[in-house]
Image (cartoon, helix red, strand yellow):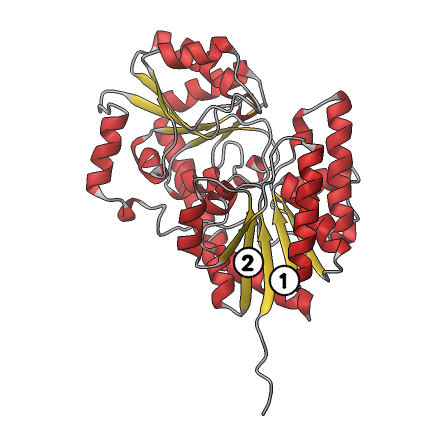
Amino acid sequence: MPRIPQNKKLIRITTVPMALRYLLPGQMKFMSQNGFDVLMISAGGKELPDVIKNEECRHLIVPMTRKITPFKDLLCLFKLIRIFRKERPDIVHTHTPKAGLLGMMAAKFCGVNVRIHTVAGLPLMVETGFKYRLLKFIEKLTYSSATQVWPNSQSLLEFIRGKELCDKNKLNIIGKGSTNGINTNRFSKEALDEKTIQLVKEQIRYSPQYKYLLCIGRLVADKGIVELVNVFSQLQKNDTSLKLVLVGSYEEALDPLPASTVQQVENNEAIIHINWSDDVAYFMHLAHYFVFPSHREGFPNVLLQAGAMKLPIICSHITGNIDIVTNNETGLIFGKGNEQQLHNMLQYAITHPQHMQGMAEKLQQIIKENYRQENMWQNILAAYNSLLH
């Protein structure tokens, strides 16, 4: 009797389950439905039950940390080696810096033939001195342990190549960029539920007399929150119809905001802070402009989401952002950390709504044509099968 071929085994690793939940939703389930035995690995966390339920794949906990913790990292490395020896994966695919370092090293040690690391932003971009040199060494070690390195944007690939972090033959971009594409069915006005719209309106104390600026992301210095809050406070003094909605949580341990910025967020009644929400599309539906002043990105999903919702964008000139938005064609771009330019761009956007809406319509069309989630998954699946054969 002929032996029934088993599915190829794929291990996907992120440092924390939040990345599986919000950066890669649906992708593991898709791979499982298309010929792979999928095992997910991350640290524990509150997102884990949802991840396991939604993806319908096995999960193992390896207690990785996002900080530099040498002793804990070594223990996690040994744990990954034990897992790989038992599971004997055909592919190990990692995301996020710590998971990439430990996962690629363990996979190489265990002789896994296909070792892929996706790069979705580089912390070293905003560092200097010893920490920059340390992070650069870590990235080079990760890439040297991988057989494939997938930056999720063209500008990020060019940065990696320019800094000579990786053998150029390992570098590859899937499709037009992005890590998971975008669910254009979810991020559309037609998909919104009226009841949830009303709930979100209550959260932000919505009134049609106001103009809402929206920023979504962690409330940390790396996301440009300091300059955004400073510029908004200046603009709002002269235009009391402005409101700023910040959707995201503080991270005091990794990248705390200055106390003065936190005080402005908490004490300015025109600034509305929502700690976190899964209803991103609803906030985008109600906002007038999306402001994204981040200092470093790979290929930000949130810009794809805002673009799909036809929300006019004002963003910083950094890797990832410039792969999605073209200045004065599909949005406005200002210099990273440049408060004066941000002030000028926001002032222009507020006083030229028709021009901003026209650019938003153009970007929406580009996103629908190039970044559909289903296409991204098919491209990754094709890449997996090609590498295996």
- The Cα–Cα distance between marks 1 and 2, rounded to whole angstroms, is 9 Å
Q: Residue at x 68, y 38 (%)?
A: 73
Position of 296 with respect to 239 (left or right) is right
> Label 1: few (<14), some or many (≥20) within 10 Å?
few
Q: Position of residue 90 (x, y in %)?
A: 66, 64
Q: Which one is nearer the viewer's eye here, 297 or 106? A: 106
Ranked by sequence position, the earlier of labels 1 and 2 is 2
Q: Residue at the spot x=57%, y=63% of the render?
A: 381
Between label 1 and label 2, give the one nearer the viewer.
1
* Secondary structure type for disc 1: helix
Q: What residue is shown with label 1? A: 87
Q: Disc 2 marks which amino acid?
A: Leu
Q: Position of residue 118 (x, y in %)?
A: 63, 48
Q: Amino acid at mark 1?
A: Glu
Q: Secondary structure at mark 2?
A: strand
Say which quarter of the image contains residue 16: top right
Location of the C terminus by quadrant is bottom right
**What is the x, y in percent for residue 244?**
37, 20
Q: Is residue 365 visible?
A: no
Report whether 174 appears left or right of 25. Answer: right
Q: Is residue 307 left or right of residue 323?
A: left
Question: Badge 2 is on which residue?
Answer: 39
User: Does 362 sit above or below residue 378?
Assistant: above
On the question of residue 385 being in view, the answer is: yes
Answer yes or no: do the residues labelled 1 and 2 have beta carbons within 8 Å?
Answer: yes
Residue 313 disc label: none
